[in-house]
Amino acid sequence: MEIPELTLIDITRQAADNSTYANIPVAQVNDHVVRMSVMTEDYFWHLHPDSDETFLIIEGSVFIDLEDRTVELMPNQLFTIPKNIKHRTRPGGSRSVNLTFESATLTTICVEDPCKNF
Amino acid sequence: MEIPELTLIDITRQAADNSTYANIPVAQVNDHVVRMSVMTEDYFWHLHPDSDETFLIIEGSVFIDLEDRTVELMPNQLFTIPKNIKHRTRPGGSRSVNLTFESATLTTICVEDPCKNF
């Protein structure tokens, strides 16, 4: 991950540059990272055994499916998925943009069979 | 810091509930934290010896003064201040709202004399 120091990052512009699925580190914060995600289709059910994960929606809406409920997030809404909690993310419309805050060494374990490739 | 798990946090609503200076933890991410800040006046020159700090602007604009330059950030723009770098934040207008991502145990050292109280 190479993020130049002391550089202004324009999330709106970066999102405009990525019309389809993207998951790009935009800031390193100690041993954590801020990533920008563009979603155009459902992700797979998964969990992170080694990191919590906080979502902040920038554009569109994002559904977060948990085992016992679904949460819809709109721009400027934030939701944290504790480590080890199974979840799936889906764009509310045809395209969404969000940030995530998480460990830079986060591991993703797919809990679907078979798993979609991203 | 008590942040209930699996709770949707609406940054726009939280910002509306805080008309003057505020700095509130809104998500715990492992040993890191997301904080919402409302700024209505200049902060003091300071540094964090033990944490990088990433800013994301939500409303208004924020000036970040560094020793050799000033950066103005608009909504959806992000900027990371590495640990140990002296900085000062100022709202661009009468009020700004931003998020920061940083270590939950971050230390702040004022490098002004005297220091303003916040």
Image (cartoon, coloured by chain):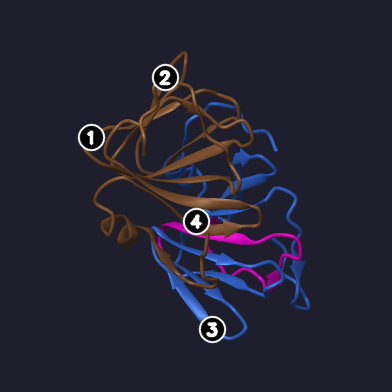
Chain colours: A blue, B brown
Cα distance, mark 3 to mark 1? 41 Å
Q: Which residue is mark 1?
A: B93
Query: Mark 2, residues whose alpha carbon is within 10 Å: few (<14), some, or many (≥20)?
Result: few
Verify CB contact (< 8 Å) between mark 3 and mark 4. Answer: no
Kindly identify which numbered label has been placed on residue B113. Answer: 2
Residue drawn at (68%, 33%), measured in percent from left and top?
A2
Marked residue chain, label 4: A
Query: On the image, numbered disc 4 is attached to which residue?
Result: A98
- Secondary element at image label 3: loop
Q: CA distance from mark 2 to mark 3?
A: 52 Å
Nearer the viewer's eye, disc 3 or disc 4? 3
Q: Would you say A22 lies left or right of B10 here?
A: right
Task: Determine crowd level at label 1: few under 14, some 14-19, many 20+ residues with C-alpha closer than 10 A.
Answer: few
Amino acid type of the residue that numbered disc 2 sits on in the rendered structure: Asp
Does label 1 or label 2 sit earlier along the sequence?
A: 1
Amino acid type at circle 3 is Arg
The magenta region covers A38-60
Q: In the image as oriented, which residue stretches furthest toward the top?
A: B68
